[in-house]
Amino acid sequence: MILTLFSSIIIISTLLGLGRIVELISGTLFQGISGKIISGIFAISIIWTILAFFIPLNIYVEISTITIGLFFFFKDRLYLEFYQFTKKDTLLIIATSLIILFSGSYYPYILDHFGYYVPSIKWLSEYGLIKGISNLDLTLGQMSVWHIFQAGFSNFSDQFLRINVIILIVYVLYIVEKKSWIQLVFVPIMLLFSQSPSPDLPVIIFSLIILNEVLTGNNKTSLLFAFSIFVFTIKPTMIWLPIFSLLYSIFIVKSNFKNLILGCLVLILFFIKNIWTFGYPVFPVPIGDLGVYWKPNPQFLKISSQFAVQKTYDMQYSFEEIQKFSALDYAKNWLFLNGIKSKINILFILSLITFILFSIRKKNTVVYLIAISLVIKTILVLLFSAQYRFFIDVFFVVFFILFSHYFSRQKSIITFYIVSISVISFLSFPLFIGIHIPSYKMAQFMGNFEKKQIYEPSRYKYTAFNSFKVGNLKFNVSKNYPYNFGTPLPAITPYQIIDNTKAHIFPQLINKDKIKQGFIWKNINTQEKKEVNHIINNTTRPN
């Protein structure tokens, strides 16, 4: 907790300085401390994305960035801006920040932390963006811009990967600056994402900020659209946000095309990044084939697509069973899954219907545009993989619009403290949660509270691994564990190897002497398949 506090001070000060540079060049989306910080996040994420094509985001990149940011922070005496807060506001910011820091000190428990977040950050900090890395591990083809941002601060200023804690503190600064008190109600729920660099947290926060800016009359359409695209690059399931910003620019502000250029450039960079790592413009959809030689094997993508369909139904049906569903079965079985996810799905549909009816009754053009954007997003998610985590942001948006005038400062603060106590109790007693909500499978991955959290955040360490070679690729596989968050690079998960054998392929280096030049796939012969099966047996069998 104490170490995360120091990290927060360094990184927030750096981002303030970088945001000041952006402010001098192009202005900011909105005024204030939080406006500068968010401009700094946007600018450095784009710059680091470009740099990552050529160099790793290592300690030299981090030190250079922090030096520049802190120079402007002290040169322009930006620390004086914190004196704008009243005594009451300052006490509120300190109290909420301490709760955020404490919540972020618990063990990570989101499975993607081990299978996707940490491996992505390791690759970015050690090598940068790798061409065709999806051939090594399909999940790594995403390389979210949020993990690029985290990777740049992961070498010494945020070694525990608690960047989401810092973003939550920045969010509190925004809430207090803008007096948007209803958003304080959301912070306790977001504490559940503070232990990992989950992209879900920043996209929810940034979408609510953009929403609030639009509702309060911000008409800087160039920056609104560009930042909306930036949110999309962090997590493409946020497609509704750039759609909404575009519709707002056209129908409300009536902007011309020039105001969309910056956003289009960010979008082009996103497409180029995905083509480089995955082979197609948008992960994981194999649409827009440019014929690059490092794109994933079609059969492998088919296996992945079938798995995504099964994930829609929480792995409660086989792909063959799902294929036999009638149109009614698709909806009924999704709504009435066994466990808590069924309740979330039903609540999502009811929330969306309620919001559509509200927009009709409200007769407000902006609310209409939000409803249209959310419906488009819902249709796209339902078509590809209707997992509850892909539409969790909709709950926040609907609640924000429906109840924004209900929550005063006092009501919001009281709600914040009550819900925060509940969330911290939830994090502290996972065994109790697992017993009383057996369908919540994440409880078994949650660690208990430890005293050392007061000093440094808890994290798992895993070092046991085996090394193998197939073709020209030497690689490591974790020992009796499904993920590679602690395994030296290049690393492949046992599940990825199994999927490779199903497609009769295996990843290979483009240049056997240089990992940085990337990966392709090749068909494996009978002998190589025996070798791979031997690897599977060695890595998946219990001790």
Image (cartoon, rainbow, N blue to C red):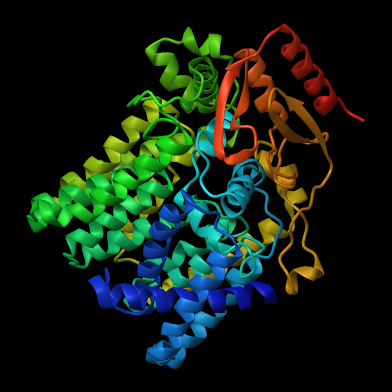
Residue 361 in percent (x, y) is at 17, 47
Q: Is residue 145 left or right of residue 441?
A: left
Judge from the rendering whether residue 351 lies leftward or rightward of residue 430; answer left or right.
Answer: left
Where the C terminus falls, by quadrant? top right
Q: Nearer the viewer, residue 444 or 6?
A: 6
- Identify the image quadrant of residue 291: top left
Where does residue 157 sit, x and y in percent of width and height? 61, 70
Q: Height in image: 393 above or below 471?
A: below
Tell me the quarter of the image containing the N terminus: bottom right
> Is residue 440 at least partly visible in the picture?
yes
Left or right of 8 in this view: 377? left
Q: Where residue 84 sits: x, y (%)?
A: 37, 90
x, y (%) of residue 406? 33, 66
Q: Residue at x 41, y 28 (%)?
A: 285
Q: Is residue 179 visible?
A: no
Q: Residue at x 69, y 77 (%)?
A: 2
Q: Closer to the camera, 93 or 527?
A: 527
Q: Give the total of numbered labels.
A: 0
Residue 384: image quadrant is top left
Q: Is residue 267 above or below residue 330?
A: below
Q: In the picture provided, is 28 more to the left or to the right than 337?
A: left
